[in-house]
C-alpha cells in the first residue's frame, strides 16, 4: 500500500474566490471536502470535452430551496444536454415562472396552524396555497390549448410548458431545445392536473415514447457524463439508460445527503454502478455526501471559474 | 410545559417475544426506539379498524435485502389494500419468482472485478447477471402474450405478470386482486423490457389511467392509513393522492434512513404532510429514522403478535 | 468474485421470539439488518469464550432513553468485565438510583418555555431540574465522606458512588467489583460537582492512574472483545488501550448512528481499526449503523436467548 | 403563521468570492445552505462584538483532514479566546509540527495490508506509523524536561508543548497565551505517552484544576459566544461550563454531520441547549448539518471577507 500526496492544510484569505477555495479543498483532499474537490476536477474535464453527452439529474426539493436559477443558467451556458427531473422540481419551477414565490419559514412550527393559514411547508420553506391556484389555471389552459389528435410524449408536454413561460428551467430548456425527461410525471402536481383535465378532456400523454429518444441518445453518444443532484428516479433513469447499450458513463458526479449502507440506489456509490456496467471501469466518478443546498452552488461556482479562465 | 410518563428502563429476558420487546420499547419511549413503539400502536389501531383503506408504500432496494415475503405475507393476511412500489422492487420480485436468487456479498469489493464476473452489486448483496436473461425471456413472452388491441394500464400489466408467477408480491396481489401501482414503471427494468419489446411489437401501456382508480379509492375511503417503507415515488404518490380530495390520511407510519433537514420529501416528517392536508390534523403519525432492513421485520412481527392475540 | 449464500426472505410469525427473528435477519443477511445478525453471532461467540476479556463502551444519551437496566443486567450476568462510559450516562444513572426520573416528552417544543418551567430536554426526553438538586446533595455528601489523605482514582470514586446506590449501573459494578472507567469525568455533571466541592474541600482525584489498571488488563488478556454503544471517548479509550500492547481486539461490535465518511472515530468502521492494530487482522468485527435505542435492546435480547439455550 | 422573505434563487458567477456566494446562500435561505448563511451572520456579529468571550470547540478528525491551519490562523487573528479540543486533534497537530505528514489515501482498501505496511488509516487519509515514533521521542523528551515538584495542569502541559513547536495550533496558542483545554487528555496518544513516561518518571498532571480557570472565565464574561466543530467532549465541556453560572451563551454555531433524533449531545440542536440554560433564550444560534471538511473552510473564508471589509 502506498501513500498519495501530502495533506496540505487549508489556508483561507478574506476575499478569496470560490475557485481559490477549491484549490485548498484539493490540497487537503480528505473526506467529503476532498470528494468535492475531485468532483470539480471531473466536471471541468467533462464540460470541456466536446465529445461528451452531458446529463443532469435533478431530484430533491431543490427549486423551493432556491436552486432553480443554477439549473436554468447551466442550460443557458450549454452545460446540460439532457435533463432528467422529478415532477416536483418542475412544478415548483412553473410556480416561480408564473410569478409566485416560495418564502423563508421555519422547520419547528405547528403544521396544523400552517394548514389553517393555507401555507404548505417544505422543511423550512413556506409556500402559500394560492400558488397552486395560479398553477392550476395555467395547467388547465395549457392542456386545453393542445391538440387531442395524437398523443403527446412527456418531453413534448414539458416543451410546450416551457414555451409559455418567461423564465426558469423549463423555459431555458425549451429555448435551447434541451429535452427534459420526467419519467414519474404522474407522481407530481403536473400529473394531478392532467388527471383533473382528463375528467372532461381528451388530451393523451404517452409516458413511454420518451425512452426511445433517451436510448437513441445513449447509443449514439461517443462519451457520456452525468451530474446528479440527489438520487431518486432521475439517478436511476439516467444510469439504467446505459444498460441497453454497450456504453457506460465516463464521468459521474453525485451530490447527495443519503448514505450507501441503507442499500437504496439514491445513496449507492458510483462504484457500485460499475458492477452493473452503468459507469465504465475507467470512469472518473465521485459522490459527495452532504446537503446539496450547500454543495451544488459551491461546486458550480467553482466549475464556472475553471471553465471561464 | 408538562412531562409525560416516566421513562421505564428496558428489561430483557432470554426467549422474550418480539411483542414483549415492544412493550419495553414503549416504556422507554425515547428517540427512534420510542418512535418504533408508537408506530406499532398506530399500525395495530389502523389494521383493526375495518373502515380504513390500507395503503403500503414500498421503496428502497428492499426485495434484494430479503424483505419480499414480508410484503407478500401482508397481502395474504389482508393488511394491504393498495400497494405502491418502485419498479425496482417489482423487478427483483419477478426475478425471485422465476427461481433466480440474490446472494450474500460484500460492500467493499472491486466493482470492476464484479463486472468482469457478471455480478451486479446492491450494497452487500450480489445478483448474477444471468437473472436478467431469465427475466428478459419472461417479460418478452409476457408482452407478446398480451393483446395489442387496446392499451393496458400499469395496474393491468402488473396484474398479468402476477397471474403468471408462482409466488411473491405480484403473485399475492393478483390472487387477492390488490392493485399494485408503479407510477414510475419506465424507470425500471420492466420499463426497459417494454421499450425493447416496442422496437418490434405494438402493445400499448397507458401510464396515466391508473390515477383514476387511485383517486376514486381516495374519494370513497371513509378513513385511510398508510405504512411507508423508504420514501421516493411511492411516498409522494400515496400522499399526493389525497390532495384532490377533502380527505387526508388518518394513520401514517414511515420507516426511513433519510433525514428531514435535507428538505426532500423522502425524509420529510409526517407533520410536514399535515400542512399540505395530506395527513389530517388529528392523524396519528410517526416516522422511524433507521434502516428498514431492521425496523420493517421487527415492527411487522410485533404487529402480528398484537393482531393475533 | 464469488457469491455467498442465497438471500433467504424473512418470514414473520405472531409470537416469534427475538432469537427467532434474528434467524430471519441472518438468512436475509443484507445491509444493517444483516450486520445486526452478524453482531449477534460475534457477541454469542465472544460471551461464551471464557478466555475473552469483555469490554463494554457506553456513549450517547442512553440512560435518559431507558437503556440503564440493560447495562446493569449485563453486569449482573457477568457479560461485562470492563465498562467505559461517558460521564453523562453515569450522571443519569445516579439520578435514577436516587429515585428521580426521566420523562416522556417531545422534540418539537419551545425550549424557552421548558427553561421557564425548569425542565431540561434531551431530544424527546424531559428531565426536571429538581433531579440535579438531589444529585448535588448526594455528590457533595459523598465527597465529604471521603478521605482527603491520598488521591482517589476515578475508578475508586465511581466505586464509592456505586456502593452508596441501591441499583443501576454503578451499583451493579460495585457489587460485582467491575471497574468503571470514565476518562472524561471532568466533562460531566460529576466533574462539575467535584469542582464545586473543591471550592472549599480538599479531596484529590487523579485522572491518570486508571490507565495503569486498564493497560495491565490489556497486557494480560489472552483474548479481548468489545461491545461499543455509540462512539466518543469510550470507543477511542477502549481501542487505543491496545496500542501499547502486542495484542488487539479479537471480537468487536459497534452500534452507532454516525457514518464513516465524516472521518471521525465515532463513525469509523472497525476495519479501519485493523490498520492501527487495535483490532486484529483475523478479528470478527461489525458495525451496525442505526439508532442504538432500537438495536441495543434488540441485539441483547437475542444474545440472551442464544446464551441461555 | 406568516411567511418570511421570498426565496431568492441563487445566481452564480465565474470568479465570485466566497463572501459573494454567501450572499446567495442567504437569499435562498433554505435547509443547511440557509443555516450556513445564518451561521456566517452570527459569527460576524460575535467576532465584531468586543465584549464577547470567544470559545472554539474542536472535535472530529479535523487535523488529519487538513483543517489545522484554519484553527491556528484563527488564533493568530484573535478570533479564539478559549480553545477546547479533543486529544486526537492536538496529537495530529504535534505530529505535523514535528515535520511529519498525513497523506491522501483511500477508504476502500485492505486494512490488513495497511497494517503490514505500517500505515494507519483515518477514512481516506493515511498516516505512516513512523510519525508516532517521532511523536514519542518528542513527548518523552518534553516530559523529562519538566519539573517533578508540583503537578502540572493540562493547560500548562499543552502550553509547554506549544512553546516547543514551530507552528500549528498549540504553537499559536502558546504564542498568544490562549488556553487550550483538553478535558479527555488521557483518551489520546498524549495520554498514552504520559502513561508510558510514568512507568519510570514522576511528573504529575492534575486533570481537574483547569476547571477553575474555565469557570472563572465563564463567570467573568460579559457575553459569550461559541463556534463548535463536531460535537463530543469539546461541545459538552464548553456548554456545561455555563451551568454553574447565571450566564449562558449569547451566540452559538455548530457544524456537525451528526443528527438530533439519535438523542446524543453531539447531534442535539442548540435550541435544546436553551432548555438547560446553556444558551440564553435570546441567543442567536444555528446548527449546520454537513461534513465540516466542507463547511468549516467555506464558512471561515466568508467570515474573514466580512470582517476585513
Image (cartoon, coloured by chain):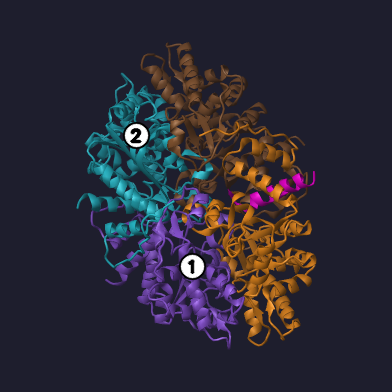
Chain colours: A brown, B cyan, C purple, D orange
> In terms of depth relative to the viewer, which is nearer, B248 or C255?
B248
Reading the image, the residue beneath label 1 is: C133
Magenta span dominant secondary structure:
helix
Badge 1 marks a residue whose secondary structure is helix
Badge 2 marks a residue whose secondary structure is helix
> In terms of depth relative to the viewer, which is nearer, B187 or D231?
D231
Q: Quadrant of the C terminus of chain D?
A: top right
> In terms of depth relative to the viewer, which is nearer, D105 or B73?
B73
Chain designation of label 1: C
Reading the image, the residue beneath label 2 is: B139
Q: CA distance from mark 2 to mark 1?
A: 71 Å
For the point 67% across and 74% down, the residue is D154
The picture places residue C134, in percent across and down from the top left corner, at 46, 69
The picture places residue A20, in percent across and down from the top left corner, at 75, 45
> In terms of depth relative to the viewer, which is nearer, B308 or A100?
A100
Residue B282: name its quadrant. top left
The picture places residue C129, in percent across and down from the top left corner, at 48, 61
**Observer able to see residue C90:** no
Question: In the current view of this chain or complex, which residue is farthest to the left?
Answer: B309
Q: Are marks 2 and 1 on the same chain?
A: no
Q: State yes or no: discs 2 and 1 in contact (Cβ < 8 Å).
A: no
Left or right of C229? Residue B36 is left
- The residue range painted magenta reads D287-309
Would you say residue D296 sits in the magenta stretch?
A: yes
Say few, some or many: other residues with alpha carbon within 10 Å of mark 2 (under 14 / 14 to 19 / 20 or more). Answer: many
Residue C34: name its quadrant. bottom left
Amino acid at each position: 500500500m502506498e501513500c498519495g500526496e501530502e495533506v496540505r492544510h487549508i489556508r483561507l484569505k478574506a476575499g478569496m474566490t470560490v475557485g481559490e477555495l477549491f484549490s485548498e479543498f484539493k490540497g487537503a483532499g480528505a473526506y467529503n471536502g476532498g470528494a468535492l474537490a475531485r468532483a470539480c476536477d471531473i466536471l471541468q474535464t467533462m464540460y470541456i470535452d466536446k465529445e461528451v453527452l452531458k446529463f443532469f439529474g435533478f431530484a430533491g426539493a431543490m427549486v423551493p430551496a432556491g436552486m432553480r436559477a443554477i439549473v436554468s443558467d447551466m442550460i443557458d451556458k450549454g452545460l446540460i444536454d439532457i435533463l432528467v427531473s422529478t415532477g416536483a422540481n418542475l412544478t415548483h419551477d412553473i410556480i416561480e415562472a408564473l410569478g409566485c414565490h416560495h418564502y423563508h419559514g421555519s422547520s419547528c412550527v405547528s403544521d396544523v396552524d400552517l394548514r389553517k393559514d393555507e401555507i404548505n411547508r417544505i422543511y423550512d420553506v413556506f409556500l402559500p396555497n394560492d400558488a397552486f391556484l395560479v398553477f392550476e389555471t395555467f395547467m388547465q389552459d395549457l392542456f386545453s390549448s393542445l391538440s387531442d389528435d395524437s398523443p403527446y410524449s412527456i418531453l413534448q408536454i414539458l416543451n410546450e410548458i416551457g414555451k409559455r413561460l418567461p423564465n426558469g428551467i423549463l423555459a431555458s430548456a425549451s429555448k435551447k431545445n434541451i429535452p427534459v425527461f420526467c419519467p414519474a410525471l404522474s407522481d407530481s402536481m403536473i400529473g394531478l392536473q392532467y388527471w383533473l383535465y382528463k375528467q372532461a378532456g381528451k388530451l393523451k400523454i404517452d409516458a413511454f415514447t420518451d425512452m426511445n429518444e433517451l436510448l437513441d441518445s445513449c447509443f449514439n453518444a461517443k462519451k457520456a457524463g452525468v451530474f446528479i443532484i440527489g438520487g431518486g428516479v432521475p439517478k436511476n433513469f439516467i444510469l439504467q439508460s446505459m444498460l441497453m447499450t454497450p456504453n457506460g458513463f465516463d464521468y459521474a458526479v453525485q451530490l447527495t445527503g443519503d448514505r450507501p449502507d441503507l442499500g437504496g440506489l439514491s445513496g449507492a456509490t458510483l462504484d457500485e454502478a460499475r458492477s452493473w456496467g452503468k459507469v465504465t471501469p475507467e470512469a472518473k466518478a465521485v459522490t459527495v455526501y452532504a446537503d446539496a443546498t450547500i454543495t451544488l452552488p459551491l461546486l458550480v461556482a467553482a466549475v464556472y471559474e475553471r471553465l471561464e479562465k
